[in-house]
Image (spheres, rainbow, N blue to C red):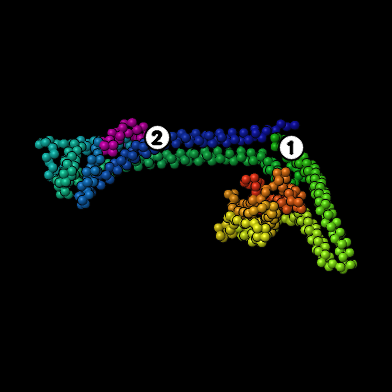
Amino acid sequence: MRASLSVATKVFLGFAVVIVAFGATCAYTLLTMGELRQTVTVVWKEVIPISNQLKTLSRQLKNAEEFLALKRPSDLQWIQNILPSLEPFNGPQGLLNAATRLDALATGGEALSDADRRELAAIAERLTGFADGKALSDAIAGEGVDDLADAGAVLASDELYERLLRRTLKKASLGELTGQAPEARASVRALRRLNRELSDVIRALGGPIEAIDRRVTDDERRATLYVLVIASGALLLSLAMLWITLRTLRPIQRLRAGARRIAAGDYQDRVSVGSRDEIGQLALEFNTMAESLQNRDAELERQREALLRAERLAVIGKLAAQITHEVRNPLSSIGLNAELLEDELDELSDPAEARASLHAINAEVQRLKSITEEYLHFARLPKPELGSVDVGRLLAEFLTFIGRELAASQVTLTTRGVAASMDGGPPPIRADGDQLRQALLNIARNAIDALATVTGPRSLEVALEPRAEGGVRITITDDGPGIDPAIRARIFDPFVTGKPHGTGLGLALTHEIVAEHGGVVRVVSPVRDERGTAFVIELPADARPAGI
């Protein structure tokens, strides 16, 4: 049998080829970009920052020149604040600092061409010459500040500017500086001369920047072309390896489709994979798993049917026993009263007593009817018919409905948060309003029966509040004697009751209704001072019947 490469080996070889191809492309790209980076670094980190600093200095000089016109009362104060901060020659943005940096680039800029270095050296020499020469002396000649220099002496531009600055600031601090003062006029002319020199230098720096930019653009275009050619070859090779890899992994799609069918409950289909690698072995294991699941599902279905049948028989047995017990005594009473009625009717000596016996018969018949209907209701609880239910409105209507029963039992009703959604109550939920009303009625009547055993004041509180996760919480609290601890844990089980004549189905029916709505109902007893019972019903915003 011919040996077959494993899936891991095939994928590894494919990715190895792709990595080698793109590694070669990246290596060439990095080498080319490294050469371009050196040139671009010189432009962006050295030449352009110098040009920008000189432009910033030029704007500052123009601003100072505008204030020296002294057209506004506040200009004098601005002059005293701005002029000391200007250092056009020796400051961080000054001409001499720029000259030093340009000279360093001209002598040590390996990424620059010889022509670029010569231009930068010429610009540095020009800046140094301007600072050391008498350019400013010529600019302010005739403005009445010739006494700044000693007789017969010629000051360098930077020294002359410092002396002119000090005199101008002194006049300004004394409040004697005006727009026509010799110091103001001389300062304006000096600033203009400096600005003109800065503008010339900035334009001169544009030449090397443009030349370097053109060279970088040409190198970038050439490098991009080479990279595209190499990358295209690598891409074609990668696509070929990708096709081979996908062909190798294509059986996984069939396995995924089979897994989806298994998840949907279809255990009959099997996956066919002809390869002998790990995927082929996985397909065999998958088919074995599907067969096992099919057998297990059939066994579970059989067990479930048996369990349901046993549960039905158990419930029917309980119902039959309870109904027999509940019906036996009323039937005996009915028989006895019927015999008495027969005797009375034969003699017709006491019609009133005959009518009383007949009334007793009717009462027992009605009680039997009520018991049997409650059993049937529990046994045939329908699925809820969902719709939008405003729980606040439903509670308000329900409390109005049982108002007479509460009044007849002398029970004081208090509510908290019971309001329709339009009046500030919780938003509507999806539920079956009739079934919720039945659940509430079962709890309320249990509370009324419990309160009937209490002497003195009797109270019932109904509270409604929204849940943080959506939906509502309904709490019904009474101050009755509480639930017997012996049956508290089983209070929602069928046929469990603490009342002498109760069927034990009311709270069981309530539990089923709430569960069918996807909610929970719990009991708290005692509530306070060893008395009282509280039933808490929590319903989600979107109730879904079981099985949906």
Residue 204 point in image, percent of width and height = 29, 41
The numbered dot on residue 49 is: none
Residue 296 point in image, percent of width and height = 78, 41
Q: Which residues are magenta?
A: 91-115
446 over 234 or under it: above or below: below
Amino acid of disc 2: Gln
Is residue 237 found left or right of 260 in the rendered image?
Answer: left
Q: Quadrant of the N terminus?
A: top right
User: Distance between the Cα atoms at labels 1 and 2?
Assistant: 60 Å
Q: Is disc 1 placed on a helix, strand or loop?
A: helix
Q: Which residue is mark 2?
A: 38
Residue at the (81%, 53%) spot, across then down = 326
220 over 518 or under it: above or below: above
Q: Which residue is mark 1?
A: 285
Assess whether residue 102 is covered by the magenta stretch. yes
Is residue 288 found left or right of 201 in the rendered image?
Answer: right
**Labels 1 & 2 near each other (Cβ < 8 A):** no
Main SS of the magenta part reads: helix
Is residue 347 found left or right of 469 in the rendered image?
Answer: right
How many numbered dots are placed on residues in this image? 2
Residue 428 point in image, percent of width and height = 61, 57
Assess whether residue 340 is covered by the magenta stretch. no
- Can residue 134 be seen here? The reply is no
Residue at the (13%, 37%) spot, across then down = 149
Residue 416 point in image, percent of width and height = 58, 55
Residue at the (83%, 52%) spot, across then down = 325
27 over 541 or under it: above or below: above
Front position among marks 1 and 2: 1
| Of 162 and 534, the residue lying toward us | 534
Q: Is disc 2 placed on a helix, strand or loop?
A: helix
Q: Quadrant of residue 122?
A: top left
